[in-house]
Image (tube, rainbow, N blue to C red):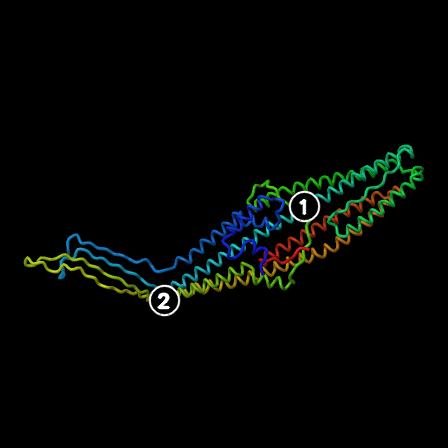
Amino acid sequence: METKDSKVLGTNSPFLRGLGGFLFFLLSISLKAQTLDDYLIQAAENNPGLKASYARYQATAELVNQPGLPDPELQAGFFFEPMERFMGNQTADFRLMQMFPWFGMIGTQKEEANQMSKAQYQLFLEEKNQLFFQVKSTWYDLISLKEEIKISQENLEYLKKYEELALIRFQAGTSSPASAPAPPMPPPAISSTTAGSTGGMGGMSGNESSSKTNTSTMNPAMSSAPMGSSASGMNAVLQIRLQIRELENTIEQLQANLEPLHIKFNQLLNREIRAEINLPVHLEKAVLSLEKQEILDSIRQNNPMLAMYQAEIGAYDQQAKMAKLEGRPMLGAGVNYMTFAPRLENDMPMGGENMVMPMVTMTLPIYRKKINSKIKETEFLKESAQLDRQKTENLLAMEWANAFRSWEESERNLRLYEDQILLVNQQIQLLVTSFTINATGLEEVLRANQQLLEYQQKRINALNQQQQSLAQLEALAATSLTFQQ
C-alpha cells in the first residue's frame, strides 16, 4: 500500500531530484496552498541532517562496485653489468603477475557490501521518519497553541463585557434607580471548534431574545428595586478585573510560547527562522484506519530499524562466507620476460634471443588460527545483531502500547469534553438569563464561563494529544494509519 510518507520519499527514488525541485518551485509560488505534506517535502529536501544521512547511504552504495580482482603486479629488474648466461648476456628481467581469489569470493564481497548499503539506507529511512515526526509534532503544537490563544481572547472580550455590565449595575445601585437601566447581558464565549456548538448557539439566541424581552418588561420593577449595597457591587467589578488580568497574562504567555515553536519548525525545514508558516484554523479529528493489533503487525513489518538489523545479519552471513573462502588458496598466473644481448665467444656472437616464460603461483593458507578466529568473530557479531533486533522489536512494542494508550485516552477525553462543553453552554445560558432578570448570580456566571474556557482548552489539548500519538504511531509503522474526517 502506498503511503503519504512513501510518496514523499520512496525507497527507489534518488532523493527526490526531479519531483522535489518541481514541487519546491510550485510551493514557493503559492504559500497559501501549503499543507503539512508540503512542509514534509521541504523538510526532506532541505534538512541538513537528513541530507547527511542520505550522503552516508550513497557512500556505502559505492562499496558494491569496489570488490574485484586484485591489481596485477609488474616487476622490472635491470643489470648494471650484463649477466653472462648460456643464452647470452641478460640485461633485464620483467615479470607480470595476476592473482585470482578463490571462486565465489568477489561475489560474496559484493553481496556483503550490498547488505551493508541496505542497512545504511534503513538508517536513513529511520532518520526521515524521526524528522517527519518532529515536523508533525511541532505543527500540531503550533495549531493547538494558536487555538488556545484565540479562545482565550474571545473569553477576554466577554469578561470585559461582564465588567462593563457589572460597573453599570454598580453605578445604578449608587445613583437614582431610574437613571441607569440595565443593558442586555452578552452571551458567553463559545469556541467555533466546540462539538455541538451550532445547536448551543441557536439555543442561546433564543434565550437572548427571551432575556431581552424579559428585561424590557421587568425594567420598571428593577428600577424600583435596590441593587444591593455599593460594596457588594464594587466587589463584583473587582472580581471580574482580577480574572481579566489573569487571562491577559495567560494570553501573553501563550503568545510568547509561539516564538520557539515557530523557530523550531523553520529550523527543521532549514529555513529562515522568521519565515511565514501557513497554519490551518483548527486541529481536525482523525480516525485510525487499522486496528490495534494490525498497527503492531505493520510496525514489525515496516519499521526501518528492524529492517536495518536484518540487513546487518545478512552482511554478517556474507562475512562468514568470506572468512571461509579466505582459507582457500589464491591462484596466480603471469609471465616472465627476460632480455638477452649476444655474447661473444671466440669472436663469434652467441645467443641473444629474448626469453618468455609463463608462470603460475598459488598461496598456501596453512595458518588456520586466524581464519577460524574470523569465522567465530562473524558468528558472534551475527548473534549480537539478532539479539539487538529482538531488543528493538520489544522496545517498539512498548512504544506502540504507550502511543496507542495515549490515542485511546485522547479519544475518551474528547468525548468527555465535548459533552461537558455542551452542558456548560446550557448552564451559562440559564445563569445569564437569571442574572439579566434578577441582577444576581454574577459569580456563578463568571465561574461557569471560566469552566467553559477550561473545557475548551482541554478539548484542544486532547486533539493535540490525539495527533501527537498518531504521528508517533506513523513514525513507528513508517506508513500512514489514518484518514481525516
Q: Which label number is shown at residue 4?
A: none
Please give the name of the residue rendered at 61% of the width and 47% of the height, measured from the top-left corner: 34
Going by the numbered disc 2, the residue's amino acid type is Phe
Disc 1: CA contacts within 10 A as few (<14), some (14-19) or many (>=20): some
Q: Nearer the viewer, residue 169 or 17?
A: 17
Q: Secondary structure at mark 1?
A: helix
The correct choice, above or below, for 158 with respect to 120 in the image is above
Question: In the shown orientation, is residue 466 left or right of residue 448?
Answer: left
The correct choice, above or below, for 40 with respect to 224 in the image is below
Please give the name of the residue rendered at 78% of the width and 50% of the height, measured from the top-left corner: 198
Q: Which label number is shown at residue 145?
A: 1
Q: Are marks 2 and 1 in contact (CB under 8 Å)?
A: no
Q: Secondary structure at mark 2?
A: loop
Task: Give the percent coordinates (x, y) of residue 180.
Answer: 88, 34
Please give the name of the residue rendered at 52% of the width and 57% of the height, measured from the top-left corner: 11
Q: Nearer the viewer, residue 10 or 247?
A: 10
Task: Give the percent coordinates (x, y) of residue 285.
Answer: 69, 54
Going by the numbered disc 1, the residue's amino acid type is Leu
Q: Which label number is shown at residue 103?
A: 2
Question: In the shown orientation, is residue 226 left or right of residue 80?
Answer: right
